Amino acid sequence: MRHRAFRDTWLRRIRYAAIKVVLTDKPGDAAAILADEHEFDGIAAVGGDGTVFEILPALNPNHQCLTVLPAGRGNSLARALGFGAMPQALSALRHGIELPMDLMLLKAVHADGRTTRAVCASTIAVGYVAAVVARARNFAGGGHHGYTLAGLLTGPCFSEIGLGYDNEASQTKALTGLVISNVDHVAQYRAFPRARLDDGCLHAMELDASRFRQLRNNISMLAGLYPAVSIRAGKRVRVKLEAPEWLLADGEILEAVREFSVDCVAGAMICNRAADT
């Protein structure tokens, strides 16, 4: 809503489609406002994955249905719901379908001993992808193209990552990153074509590409081709890092994380999505 063109084009249409529209001024506002809106059984987040990350803890999953109007840079969840653009999302407010959606529970331990617990709906990542998202903040005016530019400027770096899936013993691997997803999209990249919002699984992609090969992989995914990378599906992932790193959690960056775990909670809440998704 900071951009006048967006306000002039979409705010009026959003007001016609919704019973009540509330604008936030700063981080933290959305969750505080939502906590007081118990009477509404449908919540539409106008923003990106970071906005969803902020309001998820304040939602009542037994009473409130969530949808997303794509107004962020990555819009991973909105794309998974079938909303590549605002007209599709607005149409779904009236003509969409309500279905269960899995969520991810994140527990992250920081280098100073602090523990962060969060609920995530789309993407958790460390390494290359987290570095790209952190750099994209410098290109805030570029919309989703900011991620493309940041991806071109960011080089993958190898590190030792300890990984354990479900009940398997942990293994240490030399990787440039790890992406754990609940949906098929990571920003504009359809990185997990087999993932569904309600499949009861986490999907993890292990990255080990050099800079040139990573760029080639990015282009391939944009073109609908899928590179040969290791993808696992399961209920739980445990990760231990060689050194503290940035951790991406649904568009937000957690700093100096040294280990974390992610658990899938199947059918945790109801979402509104496009009927043909």
Image: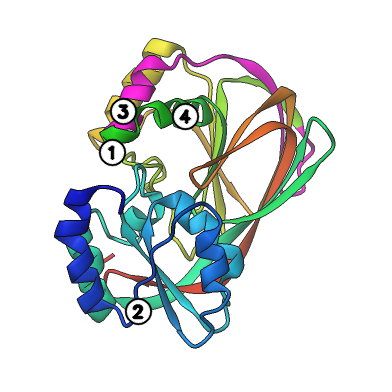
- Tell whether position 145 is magenta: yes
Helix, strand or loop at label 1? It is loop
**Mark 1 / mark 3, whichever is N-terminal:** 1
Inspect the image, locate mark 3, and give the three-letter code of the amino acid beneath it: Thr
User: Which residue has dot 1 on it?
Assistant: 143
Percent coordinates x, y for residue 273 in the rendering: 33, 69
Inspect the image, locate mark 1, and give the three-letter code of the amino acid beneath it: Gly
Q: Is residue 259 above or below residue 155?
A: below
User: Which residue has dot 2 on it?
Assistant: 20
Percent coordinates x, y for residue 50 in the rendering: 47, 49
Residue at 59% x, 14% y: name it: 158
Please, which colouring scheme is shown? rainbow
User: Which residue has dot 4 on it?
Assistant: 229
User: Which residue has dot 3 on it?
Assistant: 148
Distance of label 2 from label 1 (alpha carbons): 26 Å
**Closer to the observer: label 4 or label 3?**
3
Distance of label 2 from label 3 (alpha carbons): 35 Å
Inspect the image, locate mark 2, and give the three-letter code of the amino acid beneath it: Lys
Badge 2 crowding class, 10 Å Cα cut-off, few under 14, some 14 to 19, many 20 or more, is few
Distance of label 1 from label 3 (alpha carbons): 10 Å
**Mark 4 / mark 2, whichever is N-terminal:** 2
